[in-house]
Image (cartoon, grey):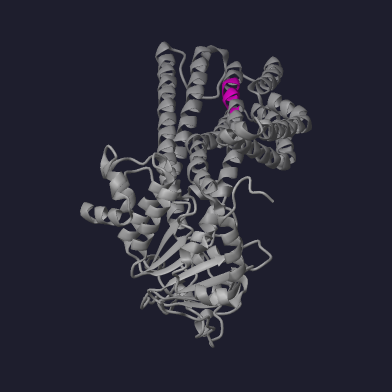
């Protein structure tokens, strides 16, 4: 067996330039030259900026909505001219026309035409906005997926699949309602009162100012309510999220809930979330309920019509206002007052959309993996750690402290130690789940930061204790990433992984669907499919993270044979808790609290009577433990 000793490089340690922005890595020959990725702005964009990819379609939809408003007001104005022609003999004159029947039918058909056009433009507005909303969903999901593909794998694991899934699915979907329904209403909410007010000014400026005064009073009160509800709105959104999380937790954990506490603890958390949510609602209601109701009453069309009615009655009674002019203002005033109501619905839709937008932007602002400007190619399958120190984000203590070792190409190295010793961190730094804080990780003689990410991933294969299968067929899962591999090659890999026999026994063989996360297969069967996948990929470096931890005796024998076939001719780093499985290792690295405390062959380490000897003794005692053993 070959032997490798722990070494330290005489070169100064490399430091990740992304974590030392005060220095330019291009001017330091000891540091890899990397091109920092273009990061999105740290400032969260508004709800308008997020729809930038489909803004042309949204502008068209809003233009149609404005035309629809104009047609609706045109219909009102045509009706006013119709009434004017009916009262032609009364001396009123705010337009031109004739009292004969031809003129009356003329304005009637104008009114009908405007109504039809108004419905047509409104339909076109919502059609364009909905098409833009669907397009935005596609664009955002594509952008987010591409961005996630450029993130360090460690960042993805820290974010969690459920949180990222919520952003990609739920938060992007929630934007659909804002884009599809809110944007035409947004245009209508602003265009309708402005156009109506302009027409009212043209017809009679006095009544126009009366209508405006009522709306100003209502809007001032409403603005005060909204300004006071900013903080409570945030609390409301947070409480609502807590209720959703409590419901999901209660439903998903139902087997555990029924087994251990009958639902008392978990349902208690749900009740607490609901109580907190109700408390926020009551506080919001007490704080702004009265002012909000008064504002809604003022902004209702009726107060505006009452004000126009009484003011018009006064001026008409004193002979200062024509009856048909008064009637026209009443018709237009209705449209002006009703246009404010969509603004109320818009406010809540926009606030709801902002919550999802904030989460989308948070994902967009995650720092991408720095890419080397002049990537190099690894020469072999060796792995070297040179004075590596690393600390996880938001942690006070380092996960690794000045760790140095060498794994020759084609050798078998075992990583052992207690939980939290740093073994998994070592394994994940090799394919750049994260970049080191200081020192260097080298694969094939090249710093991993100087290797293109896709090339680096082609050097390393993983077999974890918690394997993952997609919901497709067994064939698709084995040749994942290698769709051109033939069935014969897949079968050969499966035979080496001790999986071909049980696969052939399935009803559809290799075309059998495995279900979500491989639910239709046993744990040992899923693990052997994962090993077959790794054999088919045939990458020079293999990382095994306690691949047989949950296997029964029969499956463990099959898995060990499969792993033996997988390890042939590869550089192997195995994280192991069962020390008996690594007695043939070329070297064993013993970690404790982030430090490499011992390195050598199993025999050498036992002879040293140090940390590894203690682990071996504890392991031997555990093998002889049995239930009911007398003290």
Q: Quadrant of the N terminus?
A: bottom left
* Residue 483 in view in this figure: no
Magenta segment: 329-336
Q: Tell me if residue 478 comes above or below residue 172 in the rendering.
A: below
- Give the side of residue 471 with respect to residue 427, left or right: left
Residue furthest bottom as drawn: 10
Using residue 278 as the reference point, say whether residue 399 is left or right of it. left
Comparing 182 with 573, the one in front is 573
Which residue is more in the foreground, 25 or 589?
589
Q: Nearer the viewer, residue 7 or 548?
A: 548
Q: How many marks?
A: 0
Quarter occupied by residue 389: bottom right
User: Does residue 435 show up?
Assistant: yes
Indicate whether 522 appears above or below 564: above
x and y percentages locating residue 322 in the rendered image: 61, 18
Viewer-closest of 325 and 601: 601
Q: Is residue 334 magenta?
A: yes
Place residue 516 in its image quadrant. Answer: top left
Q: Is residue 184 above or below residue 384?
A: above
Q: Main secondary structure of the magenta part?
A: helix
């Amino acid at each position: 067996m070959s032997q490798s000793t722990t070494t330290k490089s005489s070169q100064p340690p490399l430091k990740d330039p992304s974590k030392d922005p005060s220095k330019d890595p291009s001017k330091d020959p000891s540091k890899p030259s990397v091109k920092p990725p273009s990061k999105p702005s740290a400032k969260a964009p508004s709800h308008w900026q997020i729809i930038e990819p489909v803004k042309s379609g949204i502008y068209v939809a809003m233009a149609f909505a404005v035309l629809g408003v104009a047609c609706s007001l045109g219909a009102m104005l045509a009706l006013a001219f119709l009434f004017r022609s009916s009262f032609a003999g009364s001396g009123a004159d705010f337009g031109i026309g004739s009292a004969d029947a031809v003129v009356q039918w003329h304005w009637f058909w104008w009114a009908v035409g405007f109504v039809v056009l108004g419905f047509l433009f409104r339909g076109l507005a919502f059609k364009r906005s909905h098409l833009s909303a669907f397009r935005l969903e596609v664009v955002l999901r594509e952008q987010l997926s591409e961005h996630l593909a450029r993130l360090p794998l460690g960042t993805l694991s820290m974010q969690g699949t459920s949180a990222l899934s919520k952003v990609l699915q739920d938060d992007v979907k929630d934007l659909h309602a804002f884009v599809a329904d809110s944007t035409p209403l947004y245009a209508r909410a602003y265009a309708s009162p402005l156009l109506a007010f302009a027409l009212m000014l043209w017809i009679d400026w006095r009544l126009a100012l009366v209508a405006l005064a009522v709306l100003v009073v209502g809007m001032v009160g409403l603005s005060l309510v909204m300004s006071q509800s900013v903080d409570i709105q945030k609390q409301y959104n947070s409480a609502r999220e807590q209720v959703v999380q409590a419901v999901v937790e209660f439903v998903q954990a139902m087997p555990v809930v029924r087994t251990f506490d009958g639902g008392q603890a978990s349902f208690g958390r749900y009740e607490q979330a609901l109580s907190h949510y109700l408390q926020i609602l009551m506080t919001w209601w007490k704080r702004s309920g009265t002012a909000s109701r008064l504002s809604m009453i003022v902004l209702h069309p009726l107060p505006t019509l009452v004000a126009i009615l009484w003011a018009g009655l006064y001026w008409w009674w004193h002979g200062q206002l024509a009856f048909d002019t008064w009637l026209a203002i009443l018709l237009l005033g209705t449209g002006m007052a009703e246009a404010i109501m969509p603004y109320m619905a818009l406010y809540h839709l926009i606030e709801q959309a902002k919550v999802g937008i904030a989460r989308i932007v948070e994902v967009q602002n995650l720092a991408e993996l720095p890419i080397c400007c002049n990537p190099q190619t690894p020469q072999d399958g060796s792995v070297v750690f040179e004075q590596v120190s690393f600390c996880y984000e938001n942690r006070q203590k380092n996960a690794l402290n000045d760790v140095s070792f060498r794994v020759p190409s084609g050798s078998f190295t075992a990583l052992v130690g207690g939980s939290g010793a740093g073994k998994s961190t070592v394994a994940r730094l090799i394919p750049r789940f994260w970049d080191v804080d200081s020192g260097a990780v080298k694969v094939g003689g090249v710093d991993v930061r100087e290797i293109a990410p896709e090339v680096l991933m082609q050097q390393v294969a993983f077999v974890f204790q918690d394997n993952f299968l997609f919901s497709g067929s067994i064939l698709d899962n084995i040749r994942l990433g290698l769709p051109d591999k033939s069935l014969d090659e897949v079968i050969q890999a499966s035979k080496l992984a001790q999986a071909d026999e049980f696969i052939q026994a399935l009803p559809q063989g290799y075309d059998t669907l495995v279900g979500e996360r491989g639910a239709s297969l046993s744990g040992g069967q899923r693990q052997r499919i994962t090993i077959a996948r790794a054999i088919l990929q045939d990458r020079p470096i293999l990382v095994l993270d306690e691949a047989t931890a949950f296997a029964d005796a029969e499956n463990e024998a099959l898995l060990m044979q499969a792993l033996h076939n997988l390890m042939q001719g590869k550089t192997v780093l195995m994280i192991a808790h069962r020390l008996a499985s690594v007695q043939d290792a070329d070297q064993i690295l013993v970690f404790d609290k982030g430090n490499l405390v011992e390195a050598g062959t199993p025999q050498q380490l036992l002879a040293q009577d140090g940390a590894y000897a203690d682990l071996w003794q504890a392991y031997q005692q555990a093998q002889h433990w049995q239930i009911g053993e007398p003290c």
